[in-house]
Every structure is written in C-alpha cells, then in structure tokens.
Image (cartoon, rainbow, N blue to C red):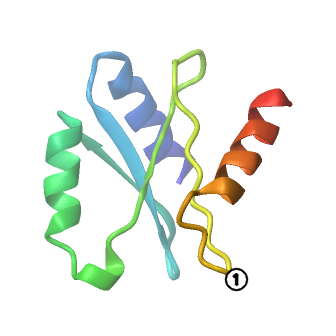
Amino acid sequence: MLADFEVCRRDQVYGGYTCTWKNTSKGYIFGHYATSKDAMEDVMRCPVGRRFGFKLIQPDSACRGYLDLEWVGLQDTNHETVSRIEATIIKT
C-alpha cells in the first residue's frame, strides 16, 4: 500500500489528481488521474450507492476545509448549527 502511495505522490509533483478509496478486503486503493475531471468521470461510472473517495492533499499544499455533517434532529433550514460548528473550527 505504501509503495502505491509513494508512486502517486511522486507523480503528483508533476501534476494530476491523486485520490484513494477504502476497500474492505484490500485496505486503501490509490488512483492517479491527469485531471480532477477525469477522476470524477470515473467515480460517476460507479453505482449511485458506492460513489465515494478521498483526494490526497500533499504536504505544504493549499486546501480548503470541508465538513460533512449528519445528525438526527430538528430541521435547520437556516444552517445555524453548521455555522456555529464552522465558526468554532475556524477559531481553533
């Protein structure tokens, strides 16, 4: 697994889009694409319930935070709960 990651990491220095998927029998599987569009087209070929993956962000690279929050509770149409969580994360 580490060898696959190192190949993808080396290739990403020269451009491209590296991502990974968790496989229950093999651990993590890495893929390297020429562009993020190529990666998303590949993901869209998967069945609807199985479309997931993680982009690998290289050290010292700019990135944006991403929150994927799910909870059971009252509907929050104004997104007040998410806004409070986001503000707390930004402060820390």
Query: Image check: 74 left or right of 36?
Result: right
Number of numbered discs on residues: 1
Amino acid type assigned to the residue bearing label 1 in the image: Gly
Mark 1 Cα within 10 Å, few/some/many (few <14, many 20+)?
A: few
Give coordinates of residue 31: x percent, y percent: 32, 50
Identified at 67% across, 77% down, the residue is: 71
**Residue 80 percent location from the top left of the image:** 67, 55
Please state if 85 lies on the left or on the right of 51 as rendered. Answer: right
Position of residue 5 measured from the top left corner of the image (x, y, whole percent) = 48, 42
Q: Is residue 87 above or below residue 48?
A: above
In this view of the protein, which residue sits in the foreground, 10 or 59?
59
**What residue appears at the point 62 percent right and 64 percent down from the top-left corner?**
69
Considering only vertical position in the picture, is 22 above or below 31?
Answer: below
Element marked by disc 1: loop
Q: Provide residue 92's location: percent of width, then percent of height.
A: 86, 31
On the image, numbered disc 1 is attached to which residue? 73
Residue at image position (33%, 26%) is: 11
User: Looking at the rendering, which quadrant does residue 49 occupy?
Assistant: bottom left
Q: Which residue is the extreme one toward the right?
A: 92
Question: In percent of the image, x 39 and y 66: which residue is there?
Answer: 52
In which quarter of the view is residue 88 placed? top right
